[in-house]
């Protein structure tokens, strides 16, 4: 029974992870659209953490279910009911934190001195490394801009 609960929790938490928002990954609506391309030189690069998107609730629900199951196996009578409730609450809180942490991403804030003279900063997932002095391209479309080599 306990092994099954662990497998269910692991499956639920794996489902919480969102795919990375890579500068190399395009969503379907971004294909076959024109992008404005600007060029420039990297001025500076700073490591940042990209906060998780709004949570799905799967971590909270999965944790609460498993916590309730674990709490239900302790005690008897009114004590069992109390440990079931406490286990569900604690499991829900832990599951929420796990989902939140699983969806955090390492990112880069890249400041670029454009050839036009403008200075801009773009934040994106850290899937490609940039160094000051490098020549880069900025691709913009629909309010979204990404930096690439």
Image (cartoon, rainbow, N blue to C red):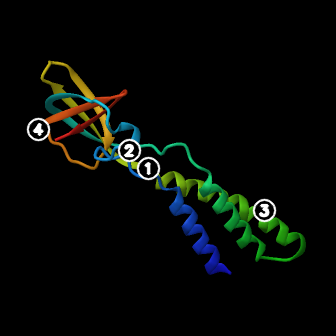
Viewer-proximal residue among 29 and 56: 29
* Residues under numbered marks 3 and 1 in contact, where contact means CB atoms less than 8 Å apart: no
Reading the chain from its start, which is encountered first: label 3 or label 1?
3
Q: To which residue does mark 3 refer?
A: 85
Query: Residue at 70% across / 64% down in the picture?
Result: 65
Using the numbered discs, state the Cα–Cα distance from disc 2 to disc 1 in whole angstroms. 7 Å
Decide: few, some or many residues near mark 4? Use Cα within 10 Å; few <14, some 14-19, many ≥20. few
Coordinates of residue 50 in the picture (x, y in percent): 40, 43
For residue 19, side relative to residue 33 (left or right): right
Task: Please give the label number shown on residue 49.
Answer: 2
**Mark 4 or mark 2, which is nearer to you?**
4
Q: Quadrant of the C terminus?
A: top left
Q: Which residue is mark 4?
A: 134
Cα distance in 3D space between marks 3 and 4: 57 Å
What is the spatial separation of the Cα atoms under label 3 and label 1, in whole angstroms? Answer: 29 Å
User: Residues under labels 4 and 1: Cα distance?
Assistant: 27 Å
**Looking at this view, is 90 or 109 the one in front?**
109
| Residue 104: numbered disc | 1
| CB-based contact (under 8 Å), mark 2 and mark 1 | yes
67 relative to 51, above or below: below
- Horizontally, residue 13 falls left or right of residue 43, namely right
Total label count? Answer: 4
The disc, 2 or 1, on the residue closer to the chain's N-terminal end is 2
Residue ID at (85%, 71%): 79
N-term-proximal mark, 4 vs 2: 2
- Label 3 element class: helix
| Of the image marks 2 and 3, the number of the one nearer the N terminus | 2
Of helix, strand and loop, which one carries label 1?
Answer: loop
Q: Residue at x 23, y 48 (%)?
A: 128
């Amino acid at each position: 029974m306990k092994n099954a609960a662990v497998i269910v929790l692991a499956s639920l938490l794996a489902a919480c992870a969102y795919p990375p928002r890579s500068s190399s990954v395009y969503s379907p609506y971004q294909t076959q659209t024109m992008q404005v391309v600007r060029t420039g030189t990297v001025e500076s690069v700073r490591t940042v953490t990209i906060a998780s998107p709004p949570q799905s609730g799967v971590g909270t629900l999965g944790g609460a279910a498993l916590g309730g199951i674990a709490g239900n196996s302790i005690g008897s009578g009114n004590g069992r009911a109390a440990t079931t409730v406490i286990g569900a609450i604690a499991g829900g809180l832990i599951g929420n934190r796990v989902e939140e942490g699983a969806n955090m991403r390492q990112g880069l804030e890249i400041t670029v001195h454009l050839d036009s003279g403008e200075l801009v900063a773009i934040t994106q997932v850290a899937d490609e490394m940039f160094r000051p002095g490098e020549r880069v391209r900025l691709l913009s479309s629909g309010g979204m801009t990404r930096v690439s080599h």
